[in-house]
Amino acid sequence: WINAEYGKQWYQRRVRDGQLQHKIAEYFRKKKGADERQEVEKSVTDQEQRYTKCLQALDELEIENDRVQKESELRISEEKEKMEEKKSHVDEMTLQYFEFKKGVAKQAVNSRSGKPLALKDIDQCVMNEKKKEEEVIAVRLENIKLINKVCCLYCHPPNLGR
């Protein structure tokens, strides 16, 4: 019966607490209404001034945003041009490398027969080496992506609802 009595007391306190909070809320609502009437006239001019300042700041920020965006687009195009130049240079050097290797292989002689190597065997070896090089490039690119992902997670760990 102790728990039942305690439960009744708790319930009565909750009801009384709710009534008192309701009275306090009404009092502050009435007080706020009276204060607001006095403040309305002077707050209107303050709000208009703040509004015009905010509009001016917004205009300035839009101009700054446009400027930064143009600079970024220009820099991106410059970097893309540099990247394309370097890529074409690398492609040219790679082609020269494989042509050099092919020329050396054409001059090579079979150690058993003493005859030069067949062109189709040379071409097959060059093709196999190109395929392996492409695989290595793909694996390196994937490795770089994974490293960047790990670094990103390390620098900015995800929020797990802690």
Image (cartoon, rainbow, N blue to C red):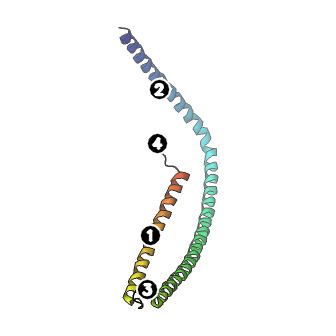
Give the residue at x 45% y 75%: 133
Give the residue at x 58% y 69%: 69
Whichever of callouts 1 and 4 sits on the residue coming sooner in the sequence is 1
Whichever of callouts 1 and 2 sits on the residue coming sooner in the sequence is 2
For disc 4, the neighbor class at 10 Å (few under 14, some 14 to 19, many from 20) is few
For disc 1, the neighbor class at 10 Å (few under 14, some 14 to 19, many from 20) is few
- Residue 161, label in figure: 4
Check disc 3 and report its element: helix, strand or loop.
Answer: loop
For disc 2, the marked residue is 22
Marks 1 and 4 in Cβ contact (< 8 Å): no
Whichever of callouts 2 and 4 sits on the residue coming sooner in the sequence is 2
Give the residue at x 44% y 89%: 109
Type of the residue with mark 4: Gly
Above or below, comparing residue 59 to residue 28 in the picture: below
Alpha carbon separation for disc pair 1 and 2: 69 Å
Marks 3 and 4 in Cβ contact (< 8 Å): no
| Residue 61 figure quarter | bottom right
Type of the residue with mark 1: Ala
Q: Nearer the viewer, mark 2 or mark 4?
A: 4
Type of the residue with mark 3: Ser
Type of the residue with mark 2: His
Q: Nearer the viewer, mark 3 or mark 2?
A: 3
Q: Nearer the viewer, mark 3 or mark 1?
A: 3
